[in-house]
């Protein structure tokens, strides 16, 4: 009951979400980087709309699920070339081709999780305190074992034409400690966003599920997740 009431408050308040998605519960399953497991049929496709002219020719989309242990996310987008030179984890991946995931389990608290992955399967994992627009991510402590994100990237090249790259992720709830409203349960409501950056032309092409005209860290405008 309290989570339904909280959703009502979100929709009727000044922090109205631009989008809402339903997150279905599934048993845990293995990943292959291309979302081929039948469990993915439980999620609809959600578009990642282009947010500037450079992004309009490169369609992008995503799916999302959850289990008792964590969040499953699959993102894919058309691409003409892989334009990143980041060969190590925890580099500034956002300065090249990347998908980004933001989870904000308790919208009343300006603390949220950010995950980035590039086509070379390198990652950036952050907990972000955002205090009056001042945000700077902190890296995870003891990022290993059951706290580590499982990830698989797939790249499909088409000689002389448009290809795609995709990332399939499992983000364990143990990694999201100490965020509130974790682990997710049926009836819970989170906020969050999904974004993409691409630099094939040397300039930034930009996508986001919830429309953010400025920084991707404008968390008050993130969309709503409802857990089924």
Image (tube, grey):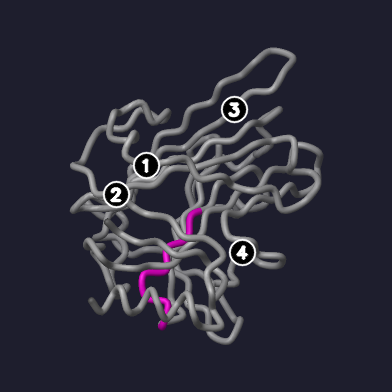
Confirm whether the magenta stretch covers residue 212. Answer: no
Secondary structure at badge 2 equals: strand
Disc on the earlier residue, 2 or 3: 2
Q: Mark 3 points at which residue?
A: 164
Q: Give the image location of residue 61, x and y in percent.
A: 54, 41
Count of labels shown? 4
Choose the circle earlier in sequence order: 1 or 3.
1
Residue under label 4, please give it.
216
Q: Earlier in the sequence, mark 4 or mark 2?
A: 2
Give the SS element for disc 4: loop
The mark that comes first in sequence, 2 or 1, is 2
Which one is closest to the eye, mark 1 or mark 3?
Answer: 1
Q: Is residue 104 magenta?
A: yes
Q: Mark 2 = which residue?
A: 24
* Residue 110 place in picture, x, y as percent: 46, 80
Q: Which of marks 4 and 3 is nearer the N terminus?
A: 3
Give residue 127's position: percent from left, percent from top.
43, 68
Q: Is residue 22 above or below residue 187?
A: above
> Disc 4 vs disc 2: which is toward the camera?
2
Packing grade of label 4 (10 A; few <14, some 14-19, many >=20) is: some
Q: Name the residue under label 1.
A: 43
Which secondary structure lies at badge 1?
loop
- Residue 145 image position (x, y, % from top left): 23, 49
Task: Confirm or deny contact between disc 2 and disc 3 (CB under 8 A).
Answer: no
Foreground of the two, 166 or 27: 27
């Amino acid at each position: 009951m309290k989570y339904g009431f909280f959703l009502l408050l979100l929709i009727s308040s000044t922090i109205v979400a631009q989008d809402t998605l339903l997150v279905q519960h599934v048993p845990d399953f293995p990943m292959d980087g291309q979302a081929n497991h039948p469990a993915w049929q439980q999620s609809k496709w959600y578009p990642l709309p282009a947010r500037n002219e450079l992004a309009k020719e490169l369609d992008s989309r995503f799916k999302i699920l959850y289990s008792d242990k964590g969040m499953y996310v699959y993102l894919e987008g058309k691409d003409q070339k892989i334009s990143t030179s980041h060969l190590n984890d925890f580099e500034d991946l956002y300065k090249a081709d990347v998908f980004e995931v933001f989870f904000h389990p308790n919208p009343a608290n300006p603390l949220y999780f950010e995950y980035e992955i590039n086509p070379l399967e390198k990652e950036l994992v952050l907990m972000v305190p955002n205090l009056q627009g001042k945000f700077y991510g902190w890296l995870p402590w003891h990022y290993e074992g059951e706290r580590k994100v499982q990830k698989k990237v797939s790249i499909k090249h088409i000689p002389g034409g448009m290809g795609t790259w995709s990332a399939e992720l499992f983000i364990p709830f143990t990694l999201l400690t100490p965020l509130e409203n974790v682990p997710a349960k049926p009836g819970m409501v989170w906020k969050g966003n999904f974004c993409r950056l691409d630099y094939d032309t040397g300039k930034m092409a930009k996508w986001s599920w919830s429309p953010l005209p400025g920084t991707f860290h404008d968390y008050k405008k993130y969309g709503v997740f409802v857990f089924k």
